[in-house]
Amino acid sequence: MSRQPVKRAAIAVARQLLLILAAAVVLVPIIYIVMASFKTKMDYVRNQIGWPNPPVLDNYLRLIEDAKLFIWFGNSAAVTIGSVALTVAVGALAAHAFSRFHFTGKEKVFNLIIALMIIPPIVMIIPLFVLATRARLVNTYWSAIVIYAGLMLPFSVYLLRNFFVTIPESIVDSARIDGCSDMGIFLRIVVPLSRSALITLVVVNVLWVWNELLIALIFLQKEELTTLVVGLIRFQGRFRIDQPVILAGIFASMVPMVILYLVGQRFLVQGLTAGALKGE
Amino acid sequence: MTGGKKQNLKAYLFIAPTLLILLVVYLYPLLQNLNYSLRDLSIAGRPFTGMRNYLLMLKDPIFLTSIKNNFILIFALVPTLVLVSLLFAVPLFERIRGWKFYRGTILLPYITSITAIGLFFSLFFQGRGILNTFLRLVHLDSLVVDWLGSTRFALPAIMFVIVWREFGFGTMLFLARLTTVSEELFDAAKIDGTNWLQRIIHVVIPQLATVIEFYVFLMIVTMLSWVFNYVYVMTLGGPARSSYVTELYIYMEAFKFNRMGVAAAVSIALFLITAVLAFVSFRFRKRLYREYE
């Protein structure tokens, strides 16, 4: 019997070590990126593993001088804000219809939209590129914004509908008796009551668009429309022999999303797990 | 009747913008791709060539390598991700000391861009990279390899980065499901005198069955058709095109080698594989739910 507590303590230690290992595997690369971004080129070559000696801001100054970084940030922001705003606005309207109205083909159309979630974007890319070329929309924000919106809509409609159905019918009914129109019910009752679901959706979608590569690569090829992730790849080619600058660029590109994560972690977890748990 | 029609019109007005965008982004491209895959797009007039693009695709060893690599990713990484996620989700659920910190940390890779982190790991794995410097420092010179420049290690290096970035999502998924399971189940098992491992096998895993199945499906789809970003950034399919995956093949055929017809055929093939998988998974899940209800 006296063995029992010892064994329990051993398991407790093992579990703690396991999670320390997980945290280390995650954090060491990130800490390394930050640390090495303060090294001079020579320091990095001679002393690749150790602490910066001396730590310098040169790499970040290089980034700032290289005004392109701001253009890339601006492009990523424009495409992200545009596509997420479009997705949430349009998707919320559809989700409202799927949650409140009775109409022919409701279930079928909804299931069809959900099914689109698993189709990989690469499958649509060639015809979309041909179409956008003909419409002279390649190398405009618009092509990327519409495609991103399309790719985000299935999940967005799904998530919002699942939330909207939890709003009690009685609230909606009393508004209707007070003479509220359908649009009025949507804007003045459903939207304000769904604030947390809408924030969740915005967080998940912003993260996805900000980090997306394939579509940005194909539809925003022009130098002045390059997004941050595509810019980073070009950057890598240019500073091949000056890796601390690349590392500084990598870190700078991660900062906005890390801040978003720190602020909106709760919403992110909700959004990511919504699909799996409500699907039952 | 008129009331019903009015309701229909109203509903479809609300859905119209979504349907319009989905039509442009999904339906039109899918049908057009089918059309393209049956034509020679490099010649003016785009003559109909029947199954020729599909035959070209099947004869291209690089296409076969690509498909093979996707399946290697599926068979190697899906079980790994399930196990790793389970391994971390359980102690988090048991609220071990510092669990909030660990939870926050474990999801961190998932929010970093694949591009940024892939670039870092290519600096890490390259010939004169961080890993090799480290190996020399600890006198393990015999392990020094040009990881990304070797046909043997390039794909495993990519696989490492995929696991690094994706395991947090699985962990969160399992954790979220466990927290909805009633405490009583676990307490009852404890009273029955079961040990920790028995509780994992008899309580935790059955409770997670449906979520694990969902995650497995999601990860299979991911390994099949959402890994372009990793490969593009880390190896661009090299060396000697040994780390190609299907998405990269489509991208290169269409936009670098100007063989749009073949690329369209591969797109259709990838779509069909995904659709079949989804169908099988759907049937399987239905059965699974019945068993656990």
Image (cartoon, helix red, strand yellow):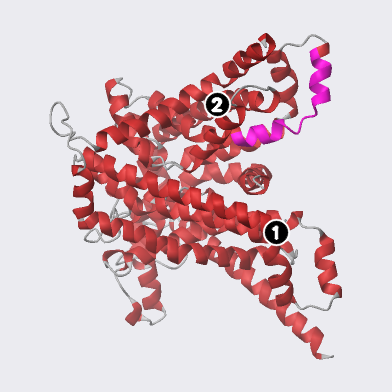
Q: Farthest residue in the left direction?
A: B43
Q: Chain of mark 1?
A: B
- Disc 2: CA contacts within 10 A as few (<14), some (14-19) or many (>=20): some
Q: Is residue B132 magenta?
A: no
Question: Which corner quadrant holds the C terminus of chain B?
Answer: bottom right
- Disc 1: CA contacts within 10 A as few (<14), some (14-19) or many (>=20): few
Residue B266: quarter of image:
top left
Extent of the magenta region: A158-176
Q: Which mark is residue A85?
A: 2
Residue at left offset 60%, top offset 59%: B212
Secondary structure mostly seen in magenta is helix
Q: Which mark is residue B292?
A: 1
> Is B204 in front, or is B153?
B204
Instruction: Give how far across and how far down residue A25 sits, in percent.
Output: 53, 65
Q: How many marks?
A: 2
SS of the residue at dot 2?
helix
Contact? badges 1 and 2 (CB < 8 Å): no
Residue A274: quarter of image:
top right
State how far apart marks 1 and 2 are (Cα). Answer: 40 Å
Q: Is residue A160 magenta?
A: yes
